[in-house]
Image (cartoon, rainbow, N blue to C red):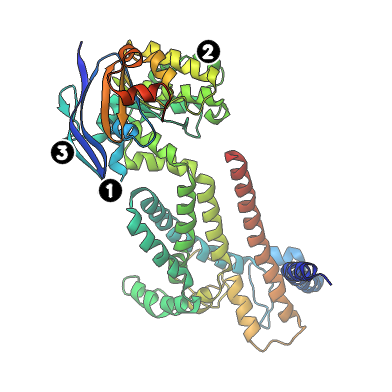
Amino acid sequence: MKNKLEAKNVSVFYDDFQALNNINMSFEENAVTALIGPSGCGKSTYLRLFNRMNDYIESFRLEGEILIDKKNIYNKNIIVEDLRKNIGMVFQKPNPFPKSIFENVAYGLRIQGIKNKAILRIKVRKALQQAALWDEVKNDLDKSALTLSGGQQQRLCIARTLAVEPSIVLMDEPTSALDPIATAKVEKLIYELKKEYTIIIVTHNMQQAKRISDYTAFFYMGDLIEYNKTEHIFTNPTHDRTQNYITGRFG
Amino acid sequence: MNKEKIIEGLLKLSASITILTTIGILYVLLSESISFFKEVSILEFLTDKEWTPLFVNKHFGILPLVMGTLLTTFIAVSVAIPIGITIAIYLSEYAPNKFRKIVKPLLEILAAVPTIVYGFFALVVVTPFLQSFIPGMSGFNSLSAGIVMGIMIIPYVSSLSEDALRAVPKALRNASFGMGATRLQTAFKVMVPAASSGIIVSIILAFSRAIGETMIVAIAAGQQPRLTLNPLVPIETITAYIVQVSLGDVAHGSLEYKTIFAAGITLFLFTFILNNISYYIRKKFKEQYE
């Protein structure tokens, strides 16, 4: 088992408010790790540490280290843009650009300066296939991405993320805006993707965490309460609070 | 009688006043221009290259006035559009929130300065300054009038474009940052294209404002209708001509007097078309996001 990511003594503050308290945690490579917990427990803040999306919040302050492949990504010499090319992110609501389906998937490639049309076509196709969307859109690549259904849009956003071949994919409640059928498709996809990617997913859906993740971390009020193999968390949690949360007694 | 009814009636009355005023203006413009065109053919009006209604040898070609208007307008928008859009992108994509909240209202003050102040600024500051390194530039010219007019229009472009950029869902910006795009790439590849209809509307408004602007050009650009693209010589715009005749001692009802209505309706057509284009774009833009 290889550790891909590691959080060392991580605390996060927004001005005087402490959002995360001294988190220590490591993530296994090519596994799905689910972050669960009630709203406001800090799990989304935590997820966004790994691609430094919190940097845009003016009051944000971090203590501790986030290591990816043993390197601290908050070091001064890290170029955030390069970091993010290796760490993709899928957001809560599908957020395709108001461009064509093709241009959406090609966006990250073009950002990296790839102009060769043949290469773009191959990579876009591969990403759409990985996201299990190719068969549905292969004849409509020039159509606006906004014409797709919500579930298709979310898979398009996943394809857009995969196109640049990151090694880690962060997902922030990726199915919360989708219906059950679209959710099932995305879940199946996540399950497939872990062969090649290290996936961290924030979810409010206990069943989803149970179905798709290898490891589950339970957060409460900025603390990491419990972190273990998913089957362990859901069958035999160590803490009462975890037990209460996953059985739906609060949350 | 019911109080609600009276209030409703009053509201309707005030709404209809604006519409009636517009209809009244159109009526006067049209009827006076029709009687003008009974004496001057539309063909002469549109093709003659001279505009000398106030001289003994009368010519009624609107082209020099249109040219003067377009010349000052293009100089103005080529100042206002690049600066305005740059400011909009800076404020919406780069500037910290606090800074934006202070700067935006300050910029809008530019639009609140009386235009006569701008006119004198152009005449007594900008023209002498330009003359110091452009020898042979006239005291009245379209260049300094256009530049100053452009400065006046900057807030129209920057404010509306910035509103359009801020109306783009934040999620798109996050998606772009998440892909490893820089702020500059995000601004030009995602935000500006997504806000393009709003930005185009702001540009059209700038054109429309520049075409209709009167004081600055009347004071600083001269009163010599001239079919030229040379920005260094005196010209006359449609608006400046109307001011000149309105203030002069031309007899009411004379042909000279009617020329201002013919000029007025030409001006009206320009702004009317531009307003319609921007209305159409705005409507299309709405459909896209619903």
Of the image marks 1 and 3, the number of the one nearer the N terminus:
1
Distance of label 1 from label 3 (alpha carbons)? 19 Å
Residue type of the residue flagged with mark 3: Lys
Which residue is painted at 60% across and 44% down in the image?
B286
Choose top left, top right, bottom left or bottom right for residue B54: bottom right
The residue depicted at 74 percent of the width and 63 percent of the height is B43
Which is closer to the viewer, label 1 or label 3? 1
- Residue at the disc numbered 1: A59
Amino acid type at image mark 1: Ser
The front one of A127 and A237 is A237
Q: Nearer the viewer, residue A122 or A248?
A: A248
Q: Which mark is residue A126?
A: none
Nearest-to-viewer mark from 2 and 1: 1
Same chain under badges 3 and 2? The reply is yes
Count residues near mark 2 (Cα–Cα under 10 Å), then give few for <14, some for 14-19, many for 20+: few
Image marks 2 and 1: residues in contact by CB distance under 8 Å: no
Mark 1 crowdedness (10 Å alpha carbons): few <14, some 14-19, many ≥20: few
Which residue does the image show at 40% across and 57% down from the upper left?
B83
Judging from the image, mark 3 belongs to the subunit labelled A
Which residue in the protein does label 3 denote?
Answer: A76
- In-front residue for pair B31/A68: A68
Asked whether disc 1 touches disc 3, contact meaning CB atoms under 8 Å apart, the reply is: no
* Disc 2 chain ID: A
From what the image shows, is residue B109 above or below residue A137?
below
Instruction: Return the residue at label 2.
Output: A135
Res. B40 in view: no
Badge 2 element: helix
Q: Residue at x 38, y 37 (%)?
A: B174
